[in-house]
Image: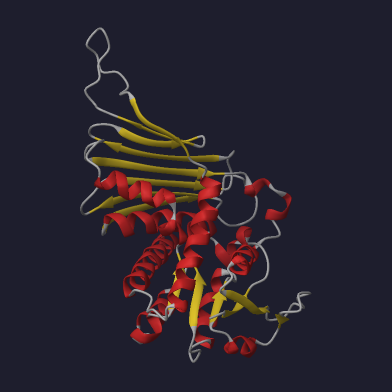
Amino acid sequence: MVIKFGIIGYRNHSLRLIKIIEKNRNCKIDFIYHPTKKITDIRGTNDLSDLFECDAIVISSPNETHYNYIVELENFKGYIFCEKPPVISKIQLKYLEKLPQRKKEKIFFNFNYRFSKLNQNLIKQLKSKKIGKIIQIYFITGHGLAFKNNYLDSWRSDGKRNMHNILDTVAIHFLDLVSFDIGIIDEIEYFPNNYSENGSSYDTSNLLLKFKKGPLVSIFNSYATSHLNEIMIIGTNGYFSSRDDEIIIRYPRNTFNNEGLFSPPPIKTRKKYNAFDDHNFSLMESVNYFVKCIKTKKKIPLKLFESSIATNKVIINLKNEFSKK
């Protein structure tokens, strides 16, 4: 069976998805859609109805368009792969929640970090007793996108279209991961800012999360720093650290120097880890999982849909509460 795809979107992240799908021998892209622009690719179309002939449709357009496309595809019988966040308002979220179960089981929201090696490591440390009880997790990522010349012309810098763009595009991944792996969030604080002073949207986001059961979690993401990619998982008996393309695990806690004072635990694990490669890997694995569901005519687990909606709800609530301050 060759799965026929229609793609909504044609550049940037959409192009990455197109390349992944094209490499899969079980897939064929029939249409690449944009509502107004003339796409030079022979598969280009400005008629959304063309995509109804496909087995699956990928929605990889700006965040504020996701809801309208999902509504327009209400009668589409195939599978839908939609980029995160699913929607941008409580009203739109209610529409998704009221969809019939048969429809929910054919919609896949691309929280691709669930399929990452980062998530594998996080789950492993949460289950492992080697570094003890996990009491704190830090995620720190950043680069200088907000200082690039083309940033001002992009939707990311436009506060009217997407004021909390880094929350919607970056922080949401880590928020989803810890929610998916740890459970219910008890308290959350959100601190956005525009440090580059370029554009009218926030270029930096800081989240502090407290769970009903589990560790405290800090998520820092920015488009206004040098390149940063660090993860720290701190336990009562040691810690996991991912920094500068390397993973290090140290334990036990009771490690002392010649004077009997605590000293850094010995390195028990040291291995290479490339965050950029992992992002590409997770994206490919996410698409492959979606393709496998279609090929086997399998229902997409309802848990994935519900977890995506739960993460989306947290993000929307954060933005609404912040706007009231």
x then y, percent, for residue 168 = 49, 61
Q: Which residue is drawn at 24% across and 36% down?
A: 130
Compared to residue 256, the image places residue 75 above or below, namely below
Q: Residue at x 59, y 44 (%)?
A: 143
x then y, percent, for residue 214 = 23, 49
x then y, percent, for residue 182 = 28, 54
Q: Can you name the residue that lies furthest to the top here?
A: 259
Q: Is residue 145 left or right of residue 97?
A: right
User: Which is nearer the eye, 9 or 172?
Assistant: 9
> Residue 303 occupies which quadrant of the picture?
bottom left
Compared to residue 253, the image places residue 43 above or below, namely below
Compared to residue 155, the image places residue 134 above or below, namely above
Q: In this view, does 237 lie to the left or right of 191?
A: left
x then y, percent, for residue 190 = 40, 52
User: Which is nearer the eye, 230 or 291?
Assistant: 291
Q: Residue at x 63, y 69 (%)?
A: 22
Q: Residue at x 35, y 80 (%)?
A: 97
User: Which is nearer the eye, 309 or 11?
Assistant: 11
Asked whether the viewer can see residue 87, the reply is no
Give the total of numbered labels.
Answer: 0
> Residue 61 occupies which quadrant of the picture?
bottom right
Asked whether the viewer can see residue 314, the reply is yes
Compared to residue 63, the image places residue 211 above or below, namely above
Q: In this view, does 148 lie to the left or right of 229?
A: right
Quadrant in which the C terminus is drawn: bottom left
